[in-house]
Image: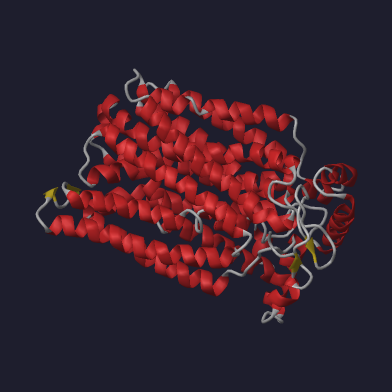
Amino acid sequence: MTIDMSIPGSSGLLNAAGKRDMKFFSNPYVLALTGAAGIGGFLFGYDTGVISGALLYIRDDFPAVKDNYFLQETIVSMALVGAMIGAAGGGWINDAYGRKKSTLLADLMFALGSLVMCAAAGPYILIIGRLLVGLGVGVASVTAPVYIAEAAPSEIRGGLVSTNVLMITGGQFFSYLINLGFTEVPGTWRWMLGVAAVPAIIQFVLMLFLPESPRWLYWKDEKAKAIAVLERIYESDRLEEEVELLATSSMHEFQSNNTGSYLDVFKSKELRLAFFAGAGLQAFQQFTGINTVMYYSPTIVQMAGFSSNRLALLLSLIVAAMNAAGTIVGIYLIDRCGRRRLALTSLAGVVVSLAILATAFILQSSSGLCMSAASGTCQGALGWFAVAGLALYIAFFSPGMGPVPWAVNSEIYPEAYRGTCGGMSATVNWVSNLVVAQTFLSIVGLVGTGPTFLIVAGIAVLAFVFVATYVPETKGLTFEQVEQMWRERAWGNSGGNCESLLAGTAAAP
């Protein structure tokens, strides 16, 4: 129970234990760490958004690409191959060398890849640049949520990690602005892809002046450095409590002095349960269609009957703005409603909106308003209905299934395995992303746009069942309490574990 004893200018509420809960905006230092780490999310989002617009112009510059769906999908998907590799290796790099060095490495790879793409003389050099950018994005996708989570007080951890997702969606929105801004500039797509080096360089410089994660430092027995960072995050009474929790946690780690291995994850029942829940969330985030919408939104809009590149990009900009706005709603709700409830509500809405979107395309195809029923290129009022379906999908997806998988995966693993498991789970995300990106247009060509979205709606129903069955609530729990929850789920006393863990824990702000 939380007793409202806050006063104007105070840092939060006093909980039942007499400790002061931290509010979201009460500590500028925590916000600065979150903002700097979130540039990695911005790079992640910018790349996924910018390629959708750049592809429209790459097809015009390279005749080999124009009529080759497979080559178009490869240009998009090669970044996903790199991200998959980067995430898999990035988890180990995080645990072995720290979150800070991992971020610096990601920035170097992203900047190099952006410059290679900008200078590409042909599609295959472009693909190499996409691979390099993907490696950086993969490492960043593991590192940023973990770095933020380990510096965040438990009562606002979900919102702060979700801020990284806001940076992802903000990067996508900015990429569409860039796409529109460079539509009349010579070498359009080169500017679109090359400008991404700028935020990578900015983050590299900022990270040189920021500390390593305090939990990683403590785990590596650099306790004095860890406490020095924690002193800038917590007041003195809360600081003592946090240090005690860290000390207790370090005594119960599976391998307190060594980096956890990938195979060890499957030897522990607790870790298997946690990884199954985390990886499942990441897979369903992709298979419920979000990056299909973001990668191919200009193409989908053109399928709906709007053939102008500029109009397609403008409508996609609106979709990206809704995605960012929805994430802000998610930041507000995730530490109030909880991760599980937010994900379930989100998925219920996704099913409905995908059904509406599919119906719009099916009606267009059957009503004779299509130029080509097989390709799904349609005209008329139902085209706008399809675009409205896309917007409704984003409105439901972005507050829930956008931030929840990343927030949950940043907090459900023990310290020795947080990078490793987070990397494995992010790899599942990127593999799923790759499958969707590589097959979406081909499936549309095979069965049509409407049936394709019906398939995605069916997957969203399965995702709802998965979350309801396997994903626990972690709202307001410390890392140590989350570990205890998995032990109880694995070995008994699972019914009522939430009540026991939440007893004495501050309510979310």
Q: Quadrant of residue 75?
A: top left
Asked if residue 340 is positioned above or below residue 45 in the image, the reply reads below
Q: Quadrant of residue 111?
A: top right
How many numbered discs?
Answer: 0
Q: In x, y percent, where is residue 467? A: 52, 69
Q: Quadrant of the N terminus?
A: bottom right
Any part of residue 186 in sight: yes
Q: In x, y percent, where is residue 29? A: 75, 40
Q: In x, y percent, where is residue 499? A: 71, 76
Closer-to-camera residue (283/369): 369
Closer-to-camera residue (37/26): 26
Asked if residue 408 is positioned above or below residue 381 in the image, the reply reads below
**Residue at the extreme top of the image, as rendered:** 186
Left or right side of 430 for 363? left
Q: Measuring 61% from the left and 26% from the top, which residue is drawn there? A: 201
Q: Quadrant of the C terminus?
A: bottom right
Q: In x, y percent, where is residue 181? A: 38, 26
Q: Measuring 55% from the left and 41% from the top, which residue is drawn there? A: 167
